Image: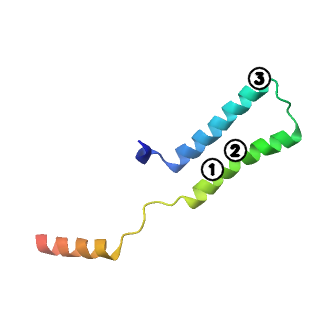
Amino acid sequence: MLQDLSRARLAGAWCAALLVIGAFSVTAGADITISSIELWLVTCLVPPAVMLIAWRGAPPRTVAEVLYAVNSSSKEA
């Protein structure tokens, strides 16, 4: 299930979840101040940004995998 999850979808889900939590807190009567808006922006934007920067694609192939691929293709021909 988690193998089909992309970085962009995970970042979008994070932001959507925080927006829903923020909407519930406003409807519950939480005060909206400049400091709370700054906190929500940092909470919403920093983790996905770090995740998008730090999360890499597939790891590079090892030397053993490259050598095995070369040997397998030469034996088949």
Q: Is residue 19 above or below residue 63?
A: above
Residue under pointer 1: 48
- As measured in the structure, the alpha-carbon distance from the residue carrying label 3 to the one carrying label 1 is 25 Å
Percent across and percent down for residue 50 are 63, 56
- As measured in the structure, the alpha-carbon distance from the residue carrying label 3 to the one carrying label 2 is 19 Å
What SS does tag 1 mark? helix
Q: Are marks 2 and 1 in contact (CB under 8 Å)?
A: yes
**Type of amino acid under label 1:** Pro
Percent across and percent down for residue 58 are 43, 61
Residue under pointer 3: 27
**Type of amino acid under label 3:** Thr
Residue under pointer 2: 44
Residue at left offset 88%, top offset 36%: 33
Viewer-closest of 74 and 54: 54
**Type of amino acid under label 2:** Cys
What SS does tag 3 mark? helix
Q: Are marks 3 and 1 in contact (CB under 8 Å)?
A: no
